[in-house]
Amino acid sequence: MTAPGLRLVVFGTIGQMPLAGVAWQVLHYLEGFRRLGFAVYYVEDTGDWPYDPDRNTITDDPTYAINYLGALMARFGFSDRWAYRATARDGCTFGLSEADLQRLFEKADAIVNLTGSTVLRPEHRQVPVRIYLETDPVLSQIEAERGSASRVDLLKAHTHHFSYGENLGAPDCGIPVNRFAYRATRQPVVLDWWTSTSASPTLRSPARGWPFTTVANWRQSGKDVEWQGEKYTWSKHHEFLKFLDLPRRSGQPLELALAMKGEVKGEERLRVELSDEDAESIRLLTSHGWQVIDALSLSRHLAPYHNYILGSRGEFTVAKDQNVRLRSGWFSDRSACYLAAGRPVITQNTAFGRYLPTGEGLFAFDRIDDVLAAFRAVDANYERQRRAARAIAEECFKAETVLAKLVEESGLDSGG
């Protein structure tokens, strides 16, 4: 399927959160749509102030965001196809001129509102196909079910709704979907970006071996939700702590690259002086055999993050309580990159096994015994598990395949 001549705008949050995980996620969409033949543009117009990694703070100064975006877009061939609207600078537009940006919306065939981060304005709503693409289910559905005016208005402004929650609407899924019809989608991955077998880990000595790793935020607040008398948490630290004894019980090297709260103190490997609460968390993890490194220094640029995945034996990670207990079917875009790199993934069960093959290359777990069994399977024939991981990526996450399905289901392949 190709889309010659069709203009497609991807809304995202690279400048708002200029870190590698966010950048890779958006770049897979930009390149994937380009390979389908679209004329692709990236636009950031969320109205939010950006995060500045140099100062480790949210700021009204968009200088870092603009410079980061400009360099990234130039590197990947979008130097004349991006725009960033700086709310704190009276709405000044960088990249495309304001006039060019207005013409883009007048002529665009589709908008993909990635993560649903952008509230559509009148100039956005004139685009005929407006796709809400949600990477984190649960909160939006529950807010809509409760009648939140802002959430309902945001969703109603779109013509199509897609979610990484592939189990939405299933009998065993506890997430309400009465207000809007969601189509299932998943993270597209540009496979040839993850095929290198010679990358060197940049943040660990080879003498320490290749551990199972992951990159995650440790403690997050503000997105817990109550539904039908139950509280469902957002922060992953709750789930990691359930598996605190895993290094001792498995004998596997396990490393967490964690984003934690604190103040920037120089350019050392651990750049952040941690809060007392998070410092205590690190002491607890390391006393139980976990290796912990700083995710911020790892994520400042694309290459260290990329090499970290390629320099890992595989990924061990957890999911948010919301996705686990409500059985959303969510699967991580970062885990899809591990699979594409030929690294087996062991991750917490959210019901994604209904839609993705598990048992070789990819393992879903509910209990620590499931994790131990997965480690044994990987150790028994690591090369077989690597091949299986890559095969899953090729079958299920190839950007051209994933996005062709989205294009078809949104009617773009037939003119709208």
Image (tube, rainbow, N blue to C red):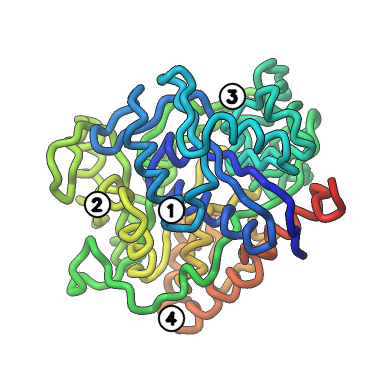
x and y percent of residue 204 in the render?
21, 64
Rendered image: mark on residue 293: 2
Q: Residue at x 41, y 19 (%)?
A: 88
Q: Marks 1 and 3: CB-CB under 8 Å?
A: no
- Neighbor class of circle 3 (other Cα within 10 Å; few <14, some 14-19, many 20+) is few
Q: Give the mark nearer the N terminus: 3 vs 4.
A: 3
Residue 354 at least partly seen: no
Q: Residue at x 70, y 22 (%)?
A: 122
Instruction: Say what amino acid the circle numbered 2 marks.
Output: Ile
Q: Marks 2 and 4: CB-CB under 8 Å?
A: no
Q: CA distance from mark 1 to mark 4?
A: 38 Å
The residue wearing badge 3 is 226
Q: Give the mark nearer the N terminus: 1 vs 3.
A: 1
Q: Is residue 227 above or below residue 79?
A: above
Q: Marks 3 and 4: CB-CB under 8 Å?
A: no
Instruction: Say what amino acid the circle numbered 3 marks.
Output: Glu
The residue wearing badge 1 is 74
Disc number lying in front (3 or 4)? 4
x and y percent of residue 398 in the render?
62, 66
